[in-house]
Image (cartoon, rainbow, N blue to C red):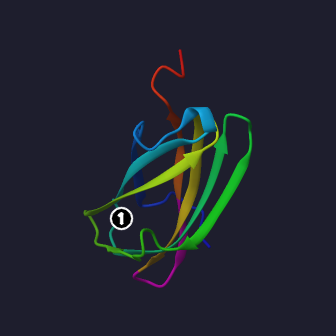
Amino acid sequence: MSTEMSPIMVDVETQYLSDQSVPEENRFVFSYTITIHNTGLQAAQLLNRHWIITDGNQQIQEVKGKGVVGEQPLIAPGSSYQYSSGCVLATAVGSMRGYYEMKGEDGQLFQAPIPAFTLAKPMALH
């Protein structure tokens, strides 16, 4: 598995879902929208995901699985793929990071890193 600079760039937008959260029961629900950009010269297919989710108590969940939202998209050079998903934390603040396992048109497997991003209830961080 190659660890060179990935031709895949990942952008993340997060949102706190107050209507689904119950802070009194330590239930904080977040959504995130991920845009995966293929800046490389060949198409790449997203095969698997690997997330490390850390809450404000430093409790860590690892999530591994095939594809994203039931898909294993093939992303053409110069194009993007976007999806939305969610996460439930026991604290008002947490973070997520990880990587996608990708396969280039040439059959090479590589990891596309997902930089760490923060999940935070508004006004939870000062």
Q: How many marks?
A: 1
Q: Is residue 100 visible?
A: yes
Horizontal side of residue 25 vs 38, given as left or right: right
Residue found 48% across the figure and 60% down from its top: 6
Which residues, given as a range, are shown in magenta?
105-112
Please give the name of the residue rendered at 72% of the width and 49% of the height, measured from the top-left corner: 60
Residue depicted at x 59% and y 55%:
98
Q: Is residue 124 above or below residue 42?
A: above
Residue 9 at x, y percent in the picture:
41, 54
Which residue type does callout 1 highlight?
A: Gly
Q: Quadrant of residue 75?
A: bottom left
Instruction: Name the residue nearer the viewer: 15 or 4.
Output: 15
Q: Which residue is situated farthest in the bottom direction here?
A: 107
Based on the picture, tell me whether residue 107 belongs to the magenta stretch: yes
The percent position of residue 28, horizontal first and vertical second, equals 54, 40
The answer, for residue 92, to whether it is visible in the render is: no
What percent of the width, then of the height, locates residue 37? 33, 58
Q: Which quarter of the rendering shows the N terminus?
A: bottom right
Foreground pick, 2 / 102:
102
